[in-house]
Amino acid sequence: MNFIDALGHAHLPDPNARIVSLVPSITELLCTLGLAGQLVGRTGFCIHPSDVLRDIPKVGGTKDVNVDRVRALAPTHVVVNIDENTKPVADLLATFVPHVIVTHPQRPEDNLELARLLGGIFCADDAARRWCDAFAAELAVLRAMPKGPPQRVLYCIWQDPWMTVSRGTYIAAMLAEIGWSVPELGPDRYPRFDWNDTLVAGIDQVLLSTEPYRFTEAHAEALEKQVGKPVQLVDGEMMSWYGSRALAGLAYLRGLAAAG
C-alpha cells in the first residue's frame, strides 16, 4: 500500500527505516508512535521528549540544516515540513536520501492524516490508530463546547520586526475552532506589520506566543500599556505544534476560550 505525502509523493511501508526528522513537532510524534529507536537524526529544536532524544545526533536547525551531517547518518527517510524547512534544502536532501516525506498540516483535523501517514510508512499503524482515536475524541469535545463571543485577535510570533500569522495558517485554524479570527495583513503566510491606530482599532486583543520568539509576561505588560488593548501570553507549542502536542493543544484551546 502506498502512503501519499503533502506533495503527492507515494511512499511504501518500511519497517527498517532510518529516519531523520527536521520538524520538532513531528519528531515528538514519531516518539509517541514508538519509533524513537529508528530516529538517527534531529534538529536542535527537536526537544520533546528530552530524555528520549538526548542521544540522537543533531543536524542543525530547521532552516539551517547541516546537509553533510545528514549524509553521514545515511538515513533512508527524511521528514520535512513546507512551513518549517526550506525547499532548496529539501531538494538537496532528495539527491541522496531515498525518501523525503513532505508534510503540511493546515487544520487541526489534518493531524489525523499526519499520524496515519507516518504510522503507515514506518509500520506503526496500531499506535497511529490509537492516537487518532484519542485526538478525534478530544476534537469532538472542543467542537461541542459552547462558543463565546467572537474575538478578533492579533497573534504575534516575532518582534523586530513584528510578525503575525495569516488566516491560511495552522495557528489561525486552531483559533477559529473557538471562534477567534486573525486580520489579513497581506499575501504572506507570516506577514510583517507595524502598529497603527487602524490595526489596533480592528482587534479585540493581542496574543503573544512563547515561540518562535520568546515573549514573556513582561512583554505582554509593556505592550498592553502601549496599545491599550488586552494582551496575553500564550503557549506557542500548544498553538502551533502538530502531532503529539496538538492533542494537548485542543484542551489548551478550551481553556483559552473559557478564560476569554
Image (tube, rainbow, N blue to C red):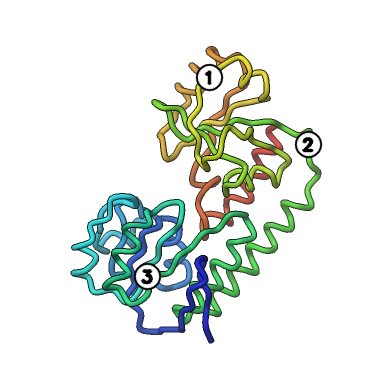
Which callout, 1 or 2, points to the residue nearer the camera?
1
Say which label, 2 or 3, has the lower sequence index.
Answer: 3
Q: Amino acid at mark 3?
A: Ala
The secondary element bearing badge 2 is classed as loop
Q: Which residue is mark 1?
A: 195
What is the count of numbered marks?
3
Which callout, 3 or 1, points to the residue nearer the camera?
1
The percent position of residue 134, horizontal first and vertical second, equals: 63, 65
Q: Are marks 2 and 3 in contact (CB under 8 Å)?
A: no
On the image, which quarter does residue 151 sit in? top right
| Above-or-below relation of 132 to 161 | below
Say which label, 1 or 2, has the lower sequence index.
Answer: 2
| Above-or-below relation of 89 to 177 | below
Q: CA distance from mark 2 to mark 3?
A: 40 Å
Q: Amino acid at mark 1?
A: Trp
Q: Quadrant of the C terminus?
A: top right
Q: Which residue is mark 3?
A: 36
Q: CA distance from mark 3 to mark 1?
A: 44 Å
On the image, which quarter does residue 89 sit in? bottom left
The secondary element bearing badge 1 is classed as loop
